Amino acid sequence: MWDFPLLPDQASVNAPKLDALMLFELGVVVFFTLMIGLLVLAFCVRFRRGNPVDRSHPPTHSKAMEVVWIGVPLILSLIMFVWSTRLFFDLYEAPPDAAQIDVVGKQWMWYLQHPQGRSETNELHVPLGRPMKLNMTSQDVLHSFYIPAFRIKQDVLPGRYTSLWFEPTKVGVYNLFCAEYCGTNHSVMIGKVHVMEPADYEHWLTEKGSGPSQAEEGERLFVQNHCAGCHRGSQIVHAPRLEGVYGKPVPIQNGNNVEFATADYLYIRDSILDPKKQVVAGYEPIMPSFKDQISEPDLLKIIEYIKSISNANATPETAQ
Amino acid sequence: MSASAQAHHDGPPADYLSESTVKSWLLTTDHKRVGILYLISVTIFFIAGGVLAGLMRLELMTPRGDVLGSPDTYNRMFTMHGVIMIFFFLVPAIPSVLGNFLLPLMIGARDLAFPKINLLSWYVYMVGGIMGVWILMHGGIDTGWTFYTPFSSMYSNSMVLTAAVAVFITGFSSILTGLNFIVTVHTMRAPGMTWFRMPLFVWSHYATALIMVLATPVLAISIVLVGLEKFFGVGVFDPRLGGDPVLFQHLFWFYSHPAVYIMVLPGFAVISEIIPCFARRPIFGYRFVAFASVAIAIFGFLVWGHHMFVSGQSMYAGAVFSILSFLVAIPSAIKVFNWTATLYKGSLSFDTPMLYALGFMGLFTIGGLTGLMLASLALDVHVHDTYFVVAHFHYIMVGGTVMAYLGGIHFWWPKISGRTYPEIWGKLSALLVFVGFNLTFFPQFLLGYLGMPRRYFEYRPEFQVLNVMSTAGATVLAVGMLMPMIYLGLSLRQPKNAGDNPWGATGLEWQIESPPTTHNFHEPVLVTCEPYLYSPEEAEREYAHAQHVHSA
């Protein structure tokens, strides 16, 4: 109850890099605070009224000094900017071999799906030493996925997919917080991240028997929601085939012009919920909307299925 | 003194306070009286916001939510704390109280350019404020002062729209004040009061007024859009209607980041007056300090995106906003360095206003420098929306604005009221505020880096020690802040004993009676010299002479 940590756990590849930058900036902050503080104190003592010191011709301005105290902070700022921006870009560029976990935030819980099929709520199990990519969306308001021990955070937005990656370096249990205020129970939208030895993780994944994977589950939903009737090469209804479409440019009819959109997560999601928005060139806009009929986690599963049949560019993300 | 503003005493002149009917106050167009009306109102709002803060700190003594009982109560409290403190205290405090009172006096004018609009701005402010209080009495709002959509537009069951309208209305008060200041500075300066003979107080308020006029309308637009979405389902921010939740954040911060400078630039204004007076020497680098205000006002418009590094906006936008945020730190640094240099070779005395000003420098330096950490993209990812941010902006907005406001109130209290206050209590309050402030907010930097998110009603037990420290500090801070209200209030019971110029200051406002007469100056003012014509050697001679007389 009364333990007193001063630094959070360092449990990801990112954490020590970030702490190093923090230490540098802390140094700058402490240096300037002390410098100002000590100068002010020294002047206050030395030039206090009645203290016999030389007060003749107090300087009223000095271009040289102004240049120095504009120049030095400017240079230090640029160093901080370059250093931190490089770290920041690393933070959002997941390595190609990262395993993907889908995340859905809702008032007031986290729903997490592993590619192999197991899903969990407010608990996230991850293997030590393997890069993990999070693909996140929200079912209602803004949330923010925050693991302090990994020094990562990303807002989770309705109607969009945001992503984040990390590589755990220390076995243990860590806090998972919602950092964006999301309503009444914002402060209890808390989870635990369990970093496990890879073997334990494999065991954990199959602990409850090896159920259907995300993509298999997605295929079931694909059939159940009657998507297959049109999109699986039936001759009766005119709808584009979906094999190989993921990640490829799709021709979109826009008035008399044809534009291209990349068939990514957001595009497929929009096509399911608002199919009249971007109609593939050469097809009639006859697909009904599935708005409010398919939940966010199920949408993610269907997208995983469509991704899994993009045989031409099977990404390592699903090839777990 | 050097400026040729002489008071002619043909019998005791009636000062601006002498007429005391309620009607004479409510229908006044005297800028000084409007300033007093604001002084009373912002003090009431400050107390309300402070009580809410105290209750929140009490709740956070323990990791379980066991004091206020329900998370909704807590959420409504921190929202109202933010709304009241920002829109009804920090934004109007210095410009509307001290700015209204002093701006015409400092440039040798009889009043502001539009005295009736000035009174109107107070009424508009009060309408917004009373709506705010009404909301508080009738359940409150739970969106946070940032009103982020789609929570505010679609999910919150509280009085979002009423609060938005209250803020919308109050915004007009801010716009009117800004407009009045800009026109006043351009057209009402006394003969000889060139731009570079203006006190830095006026420069800072001029820069503030520019932001008020240019940024506040954007807040109004955002609020109108939230209303349209809520009532008519116009899809602006909610993705289910085809809107974009991040768009709201862009609009909101396009006002609210410059608004931070609306709060703190007037603080700079006060400090730039106090330090030369108690150091008894001209400010160091007058032109740099003046231009830094304008630079902050301009840069302040270009950095709103640094509130959104993890919002899902593009990484490249993040990089641009990051570098611009670093750049806005430079003019603030210029000011701190110049104030420090102003102490060199001065003849320093440590009366209450000076203690507040020195405290301001310490707190603002910490607040400003920790801003560098937040401007750093990768670090911001970790500390964004944690207590680190809470600590940072309280150092800027309370440590900066409130310290400066209290310093300014003490500095000009003899001019405003004609009374002195007990110096010993003043010094004690400055000390308690400084110590209490650091005890309250420094632990929050640590809490934030440890990962405690803000706006949490309950928290992990490992965060308790630091929270208890913070709450203990808040108690000291509260005592320090209550004290001036008591002894300044009590000072009104004594006769007007302050004298025209108790600090021996050189500004035009000190060359007339305390309290000033209704028409400020008895004859046209002619300015023939620059501001801050203090001499440390002169001050030493006077001091030695006084000591000599005393000991003789």
Image (cartoon, coloured by chain):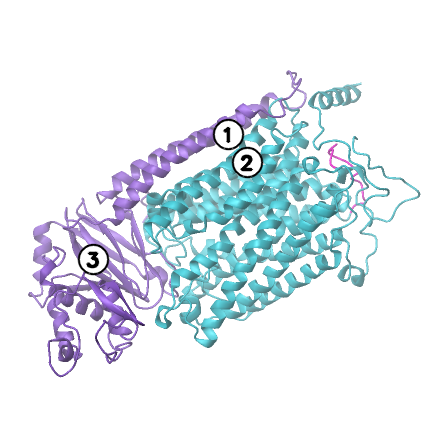
Q: Alpha-carbon neighbours of circle 1 within 10 Å: few (<14), some, or many (≥20)?
A: some
Q: Secondary structure at mark 3?
A: strand
Under mark 3, the amino acid is Leu
Question: Label for residue B71?
Answer: none
Which residue was labeled with disc 2? Answer: B361
Residue at 81 percent across and 37 percent down: it is B526
Whichever of callouts 1 and 3 sits on the residue coming sooner in the sequence is 1
Q: Alpha-carbon neighbours of circle 3 within 10 Å: few (<14), some, or many (≥20)?
A: many
Which residue reaches farthest bottom?
A236
The chain letter for the residue carrying disc 2 is B
Q: Is residue B536 left or right of residue B243?
A: right
Residue at 37 percent across and 38 percent down: it is A81
Q: Which residues are magenta?
A: B494-507
Which residue was labeled with disc 1? Answer: A36
Task: Name the spot of residue B364 as percent of width and height, x first.
Answer: 52, 39
Magenta-drawn stretch contains B156 = no
Spatial CA span between label 3 and label 2: 46 Å
Specify the principal SS of the magenta part.
loop
Under mark 2, the amino acid is Met
Q: Is residue A209 above or below residue A22?
A: below
Q: Is residue B475 above or below residue B434?
A: below
* Front residue of this view, candidates B343 and B542: B343
The picture's colour for chain B is cyan
Which residue was labeled with disc 3? Answer: A124
Q: Which chain is purple?
A: A
Task: Name the spot of residue B435 as percent of width and height, x first.
Answer: 52, 39
Residue at 82 percent across and 50 percent down: it is B518
